[in-house]
């Protein structure tokens, strides 16, 4: 039986929810060794940072969106990339 990296990542709790076909193809193309590294890294981070992991499980969306703000409008990413400027 062929190794299914996407399935292994889902079982490890790394992947969840719907994905675009491109992401599905990417994760499905990972080797078993690459997949095991990702799973091992996740497990080590959870062991080293249990408080951060516990808090992140409760966080579903940015607090700004809970207050009615559009999170994309509050993100500084556009300032760095220039994507926040209108094209003329």
Image (cartoon, grey):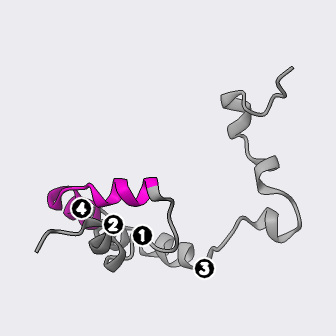
Q: Which mark is residue 42?
A: 2
Residue 55, image x, y percentages: 56, 75
Whole-angstrom CA distance, mark 3 to mark 2, is 17 Å
**25 sits to left or right of 69:** left
Q: Which residue is mark 4?
A: 35
Q: Which mark is residue 15?
A: 1
Left or right side of 83 for 40: left
Q: In the rendered structure, which disc, 1 or 2, sits on the residue that comes first in sequence?
A: 1
Q: Secondary structure at mark 2?
A: helix
- In the rendered image, residue 61 lying in the magenta stretch gets the answer no
CB atoms of marks 2 and 4 within 8 Å:
no
Instruction: Determine the CA span between mark 4 and mark 1.
Output: 12 Å
Between marks 1 and 3 in the image, the one whose residue lies nearer the viewer = 1
- Closer to us: 5 or 68: 5
* Mark nearer the N terminus (3 vs 2): 2
Residue most extreme to the left: 1
Say left or right for 5 vs 73: left
Between marks 2 and 4 in the image, the one whose residue lies nearer the viewer: 4
Looking at the rendering, the stretch of residues picked out in magenta corresponds to 22-40
The residue depicted at 63 percent of the width and 74 percent of the height is 59
Q: Quadrant of residue 37?
A: bottom left
Q: Earlier in the sequence, mark 1 or mark 3?
A: 1
Quadrant of the image containing the N terminus:
bottom left
Disc 3 residue crowd, few under 14, some 14–19, many 20+, Cα 10 Å: few
- Local secondary structure at mark 1: loop
Q: Residue at x 24, y 66 (%)?
A: 40
> In front here: 70 or 1?
1
According to the picture, the residue beneath numbered tag 3 turns out to be: 58
**Which residue does the image show at 32% across and 67% down from the upper left?**
6
């Amino acid at each position: 039986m062929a190794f299914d990296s996407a399935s292994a990542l889902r079982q490890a709790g790394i992947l969840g929810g719907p994905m675009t076909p491109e992401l599905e193809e990417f994760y499905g193309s990972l080797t078993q060794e690459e997949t095991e590294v990702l799973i091992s890294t996740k497990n080590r981070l959870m062991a080293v940072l249990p408080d951060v992991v516990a808090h992140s499980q409760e966080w579903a969306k940015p607090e700004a969106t809970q207050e009615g703000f559009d999170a994309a409008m509050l993100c500084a990413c556009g300032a760095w990339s220039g994507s926040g400027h209108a094209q003329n």
